[in-house]
Image (tube, grey):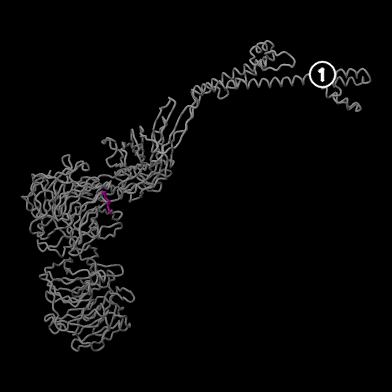
Amino acid sequence: MFYVILQLALSLEISPIPSSLSPPTVRRSLSAVYSPTHNSAFFYGGCKFSADTYSNIMWEFKLTSNTWKHLDMRTSLLPEYRYGASMGLYKDLIYAYGGATHLGPSAELWTYNITNDIWEEIKPLGDRPIELSMSGFCSFEWENQSWFAVFGGNSMYSSGSNELYIMNFETQIWRRMPKQGNIPAERVGSGIVFYNEALYMWGTSEKNRSLEENQRLYKYDLKGEKWSFLETYGEVAEIRNHHGIALIENYLYVFLGIDHYKNKESSSTYRVNLNDGKWEKVMMTGDVITRNKFGYVQSGKSVWVICGTNSKGLYNSIYKYDFSINTVTTVIKNYKMPKRRHSYSFNKIGTNIVMFGGYDYDLVFSDLFIWDLQKQIWYDRIPGGSAPSPRFHHCSTVYQGLNLIIFGGEDSKGSFSEFYLYNFDRNAWSIIKTDISVSKKTFCCMSTYKNFVIVHGGKTTQSSASDEVLVLNMNTRTLKILPSYSAKDADAKLMNHKCWVREKDDDIWFILSLGERSDLSPSSSIYKASIKDLWEKKSLYWTILKDTSNSTIVNWASSGYALMNDWLIQIGGSRLVLYASSLINIIPLSENSNPQTLSDESNDIFWHKHGVEHFGRDLIIAYSGATSGDLIKKEFVISQMYKISPNDNEKKYFLCSTGTYGEDCLPCPFGTYSDIIGAEVCKKCPAGTMGTYIAATSLYMCLPCPFGSFTANEGSAFCQNCVSGFFCPVGSTEYSLSFNTPSIEIIRPEAYSKILSDPFKGKVYYIVYFFSITILISSWCWVWVRRKIRRVDYFSEKHPTNENEPIIKLKTTIGGIVTISFTLFAIIYVTELLNMYFNDNIIEEKSLVPFVTLNENFIVSVFKITIELFYYRGSCIDQNNQDNCIFDLYTESSGVKWIRSCKKVKPSTCVIELSCFNCEILGNENIINKICEFGSFASGIRVTVSSDSSIPESISSVSYYINHNDGKVFRGTDSSIFFYGITRSLFLSEPSEWPSIQKGYHIAPESSPIIGSSYEGKEINLETCLQFQVNLEMTNSILVIKRKFILSFVMLVSTGIGSIFGFLELFGIAMILFEKIEDYVYKKISIRKSLVMITKNRVRILFSFDYAKLSTRVRKSWTSTFEGYFNMMLKKNPQDNLSIEEIS
């Protein structure tokens, strides 16, 4: 609630920054004179490099207060920019002769009136000097007249001159002095003084003459009009030029300078007695400096050295040489300054304010300067990347704490329509490439809301004010143009205005401050439009937030503003491009309170097209456009900065800025941030992050813990080292064990196979063997068994018969055994055949056919893409959304409409599922995902693409995994890309066990994933999005899988019958073979028995004759084998060597 403001007297403290006021920019080869009346040094011109002429502005440095003043220019006729001019002072006129312009040395003579700030060119009288620059010069009194002397310097014809000119200040008549006597050689950057009716000159000769010539002290007798050199002795000064000289009593002091031929800079000081010629070195105490090409002035026994250069750079510092005590002291430290300008951008980032671009008469800038709010100094930056061209009248804002965004603007050739981003940490520009182009604009305003950058109005190429709104989604880099509609009394077509976002009354408002219209008249209202659900809006509707038509004190355009929640502070402004304002106003945003001014007409500082920023309770006001009183003029921009600080009475209107907090508006310490105005306390950085910025203004200035460290605490300024043996990826809140995941996993339907239950484990035919052997043994052992078995003999016709005997069907035991064995075999075979028919009568065939040959729609019940982000540090989920995903997750698909869902698994794995139900993939599919919340980075990504296979109750799936274990994380503009091959698959089935037809997709790995943008350290937060892309490449073939019966039932029966009869014949043949073998064995046994009988009979015969004595041995041997006995007999009676056959 804004309380009614009482009328206040001027009590704000408006102080210059720095306290000495803004100095000129660094330079060399400037010219200076001293005014005793003002006790000031006046200097003019100067440059950075010889070809870079720098200035035609007159500056005053007040020696009493040590403050700078940028003198006004009140005439249209001005000298060209130049350096190296010769200057003299007479009464209130500063004379400036010569100097180098962009055309070379000049012979012009100008006067500057200190009293009325008027330049005037003087027509030279008498001996007109030649064009000269970098001459030695001095002013002096001689014969009761005031004179101005110029010696040497660069001319249009040579690199040095030895001409001497003097001019009478009163008559303004020049005289070229005769060259007589010992004429000095040509010189540049020498010094001359007047003493006892003579001019004394010292400095190095041009073209590096002899040491003797370079060390000579020359004297020009003004009465005798001739040159001579003073005989000197003692410790002569080292040779040099572009030095300083001072006359104190009868001593000529020489200090600083450079010997260009040896490139030797001097910091030493010498003096020579002009009466006796004695040189001596002066030992100076205090600061030790080296300078050359500086400006200097003398007052009494002191000399002030202004600006200059040395081998290290250029300066705008001031040093005082006090020769009464021989000391050197710093008066003004070197202070880097941007060139004067207006219509620039001026935005706070942490404890720094970034100035970019701007304009000064005929100069357009693209440089970038930083104002350090803590050190109170400027420094320049040379950014990398794609920098914007020089421009002014552009609009700008800060995005996520560390990014400066600019849009539009113009230069001398036209206007622009591009967006640029400057990242403070990276010190780099980049162009923001958007999906559409927009018209060129200037004088627009810009603000941010969440991930949106909003641009309003401005001047179009038709030079008219606009109410068009551009909304740039920084996450997707997409641009939206919103037309505007207004209430009857609200005209939001503005330019030269400011805008911001305000959350009030459960709504979000985009506010437009006072500006000007197409006819350059100031607007008389502050406007608002609701931007709730901004990205869904088709247009904006504007209404009046506050009518200021009756408050003429605030109706200014091009003002500086500082927002204070329910009110704003307005500083300066312009009206009709004619008048500037010095007012500092408070404008409440409620209708019930009237604007009031905190300053009155006694404030003589006028501002327009200036920059204003807010830090703590102070307002920083930078350079302003040029004014003369309250009148605006084009030239001579004010290069002065101010700080507005409230006194106790005004503190309640000057709230703490973002980045500060509390009663004293202290900067938020490390580990914290404040993104609101008027904060009582700072917010803490989340666990897993550390705050390395002081006065941080955004959550995005909290950096994740580096790889190998962690923090479980909020508000940490640093992270702890990881415990040895554990794993701490980027952004860890705790230490943990690492896990290994394969880089690729494939799940495919297996080839069809039917596993039949077999209680005998494949040994069913052992039953036949077992029963057959059992029956055989039984029949051998028991006669009754043989009789029973013989009855079932089926093979009676196959038994052999004897020749010449009747054919009688016999049934044998062997035939019965074979019959029983066959019967068992047949039963088992038929059983298995039936089992195979009913359970394993299916074969699966696969083939690839061209897609064009089948006119089919391939719709599957579920096609799913699962993305797992490991060690993800964002929130991932938002239960307020229908899909449970955060608002800043973007999914783009080239064809399929995916149903998205999110979940957080464990503390640090974000799972994003993209599902397509009753889905058809018509062709190649490219799915781009982008997640852009705080902490949206991951150390590992696994993408799994799975689909219902056409094979029932099966899926096809491929997973890729990529990761970083080197301190980097996945984040940035380049997506990590995962490639998958998709093949349509068609399942056809004859058996009713499965659907007759089913469709699906077969997933296969394609090429290896492409690793996207990865960053480490501070660079992680330079990007805001994690991007990953899934490419599904559809093949032109269809995988056809057929399952069909191997045998039909008729074929099964015929096959079974044929097989059984075939086996029957095989069993019969086996029986016949067995019986034949049996007959053969039987015959052999019969012959053996006959042989044994014959042998026994012969033995009896032998015993009956003369072999009785061997009977005992024969009996013993007979018990062994017949062969053994027979062999024994042969050995005993070799004459009876008969074979067994012969014995038989």
Vertical side of 1046 occupied by 298: above or below = below
Residue at the (21%, 83%) spot, across then down: 164
Name the quadrant containing residue 791: top right
x and y, in percent, of residue 210 in the image: 33, 83
Vertical side of 213 occupied by 373: above or below = above
Can the viewer see residue 920 in this picture? yes
Badge 1 marks a residue whose secondary structure is: helix
Left or right: 778 as drawn, with respect to 382: right
Q: Nearer the viewer, residue 689 or 786?
A: 786
- Tally of numbered discs: 1
Amino acid marked by disc 1:
Ser
x and y, in percent, of residue 1065 in the image: 62, 21
Name the quadrant containing residue 768: top right
Q: Is residue 434 magenta?
A: yes
Left or right: 186 as drawn, with respect to 488: right
Left or right: 360 as drawn, with respect to 741: left
- Find the magenta span and give its range: 431-435
Q: Nearer the viewer, residue 669 or 928?
A: 928
Q: Nearer the viewer, residue 384 or 86?
A: 384
Q: Quadrant of the C terminus?
A: top right
x and y, in percent, of residue 87 in the image: 18, 76
- Toward the right, the furthest residue is 1106
Q: Is residue 1105 magenta?
A: no
Main SS category, magenta section? loop
Vertical side of 284 occupied by 386: above or below = above
Residue at the (43%, 28%) spot, across then down: 989
Can the viewer see residue 319 in this picture? no
Residue that mark 1 sits on? 1090
Q: Quadrant of the N terminus?
A: top left
x and y, in percent, of residue 26 in the image: 24, 66
